[in-house]
C-alpha cells in the first residue's frame, strides 16, 4: 500500500447530520408516519439528488409543484426551511478531523454531494469546513458521486493520486467507486468505528 498523504471526506452523514424529518415532523404535527410518506412519495431522495447534481432549487420546486399542486405549501417548505434540516455536527468525526488537522501529516480534502445553493449555508454554520484544503461540491461541478468523473475531477483539482488517498463516506456505492479507482475507501458507520479503522491503517 502506498504512503497515505491525503484524506478525503464526505460531509453529510459523516461530519454533518442532515434530516428532512426535522422540518416535516413539525409540518405534520408530529405524525412521523405521514412525514415519512411525504418524503418517500413527494419530495423524494431521487428528486433532491438532482439538486445535488446541479439543478436549481427554483426549478426543482416548480417542477414538483406542477406534479403535485395539492402539496404546494409543503413542497415549498423543503428549501424555505432547508437550514432546519441540519441537525448539527457529528462531533466524534469532527474530533477525528481536528486530530488529523493538528497532526499536519495529511492534506485534507472533501468530495460532497450537495446543492451549490445550500452548501454556503453549511459553510457559515460549521467552522470546521474551513479546515479543508479543497472541497468539491457536486452541485457546483455538475458531477455527482458515485460516478467516476467527480473523483477523477478531484484528483486533477487537488493534484493527488488515488493510491495515496483515503476516502471516507457513509454511502457504500461511493466507497465502491473509490476503491475501483485505487483509493483506500472507508465506509463510515459511526465515529468510533472510523477512528479504529484509521488507527489500524496507522493514520491516527
Image (cartoon, rainbow, N blue to C red):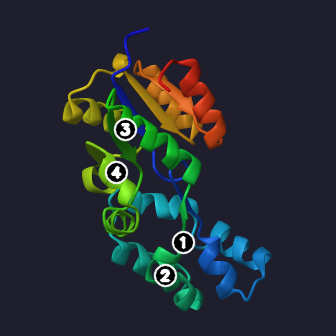
Give the numbered dot on residue 138. 4
Q: Please give the residue where the numbered disc 1 appears in the rendered image.
A: 85
**2 and 1 marks in contact (CB < 8 Å):** yes
Mark 1 touches mark 4? (CB < 8 Å): no
Mark 4 vs mark 3, foreground winner is 3
Category of crowding for the residue at label 3, using alpha-carbon neighbours closer than 10 angstroms: few (below 14), some (14–19), many (at least 20): few
User: What is the distance, in whole Å, between disc 2 and disc 1 at their CAs?
Assistant: 7 Å
Q: Secondary structure at mark 4?
A: helix
Q: Nearer the viewer, mark 1 or mark 3?
A: 3
Near mark 1 (Cα within 10 A), the count class, few <14, some 14-19 or many ≥20, is some
Above or below: residue 107 compared with residue 128: above
- The answer to whether the residues at label 4 and label 3 have Cβ atoms under 8 Å apart is no
Residue in the image at 59% along x and 70% along y: 20
Distance from Cα at disc 1 to Cα at disc 3: 30 Å
Residue 45, given in percent of the width and then of the height, sits at 56, 61
CA gap, disc 2 and disc 3: 35 Å
In 3D space, how far apart are the residues under numbered discs 2 and 4 (Cα atoms)? 21 Å
Q: Which tag, 2 or 3, sits closer to the chain's start?
A: 2
Residue 146 seen by the camera:
no
Dot 2 corresponds to which residue? 81
Q: Secondary structure at mark 2?
A: loop
Q: Is residue 199 above or below residue 143?
A: above
Question: Looking at the rendering, which quadrant does residue 39 occupy?
Answer: bottom right
Residue count near mark 2 (Cα–Cα under 10 Å), binned few <14, some 14–19, many ≥20: some
Location of the N terminus (image quadrant): top left
**Mark 4 or mark 3: whose residue is earlier in sequence:** 3
Residue bearing mark 3: 102
Label 1, label 4: how many angstroms apart (C-alpha)? 19 Å
Q: Is residue 63 above or below residue 26?
A: above
SS state under label 1 = helix
Q: Comparing marks 2 and 3, which lies closer to the viewer? A: 3
Residue at 56% from the left image edge and 82% from the top image edge: 68
Amino acid at each position: 500500500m502506498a504512503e497515505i498523504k491525503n484524506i478525503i471526506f464526505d460531509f453529510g452523514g459523516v461530519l454533518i447530520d442532515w434530516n428532512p424529518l426535522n422540518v416535516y415532523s413539525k409540518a405534520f404535527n408530529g405524525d412521523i408516519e405521514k412525514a415519512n410518506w411525504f418524503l418517500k412519495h413527494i419530495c423524494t431522495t431521487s428528486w433532491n439528488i438532482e439538486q445535488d447534481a446541479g439543478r436549481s432549487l427554483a426549478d426543482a420546486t416548480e417542477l414538483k409543484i406542477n406534479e403535485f399542486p395539492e402539496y404546494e405549501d409543503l413542497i415549498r417548505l423543503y428549501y424555505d426551511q432547508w437550514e432546519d434540516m441540519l441537525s448539527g455536527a457529528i462531533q466524534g468525526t469532527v474530533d477525528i478531523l481536528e486530530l488529523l488537522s493538528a497532526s499536519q501529516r495529511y492534506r485534507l480534502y472533501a468530495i460532497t454531494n450537495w446543492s451549490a445553493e445550500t452548501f454556503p449555508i453549511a459553510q457559515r454554520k460549521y467552522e470546521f469546513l474551513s479546515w479543508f484544503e479543497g472541497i468539491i461540491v457536486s452541485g457546483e461541478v455538475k458531477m455527482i458521486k458515485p460516478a467516476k468523473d467527480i473523483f477523477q475531477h478531484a484528483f486533477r483539482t487537488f493534484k493527488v493520486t488515488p493510491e495515496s488517498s483515503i476516502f471516507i463516506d457513509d454511502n457504500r456505492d461511493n466507497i465502491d467507486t473509490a476503491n475501483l479507482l485505487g483509493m483506500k475507501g472507508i465506509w463510515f458507520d459511526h465515529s468510533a468505528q472510523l477512528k479504529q479503522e484509521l488507527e489500524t491503517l496507522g493514520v491516527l
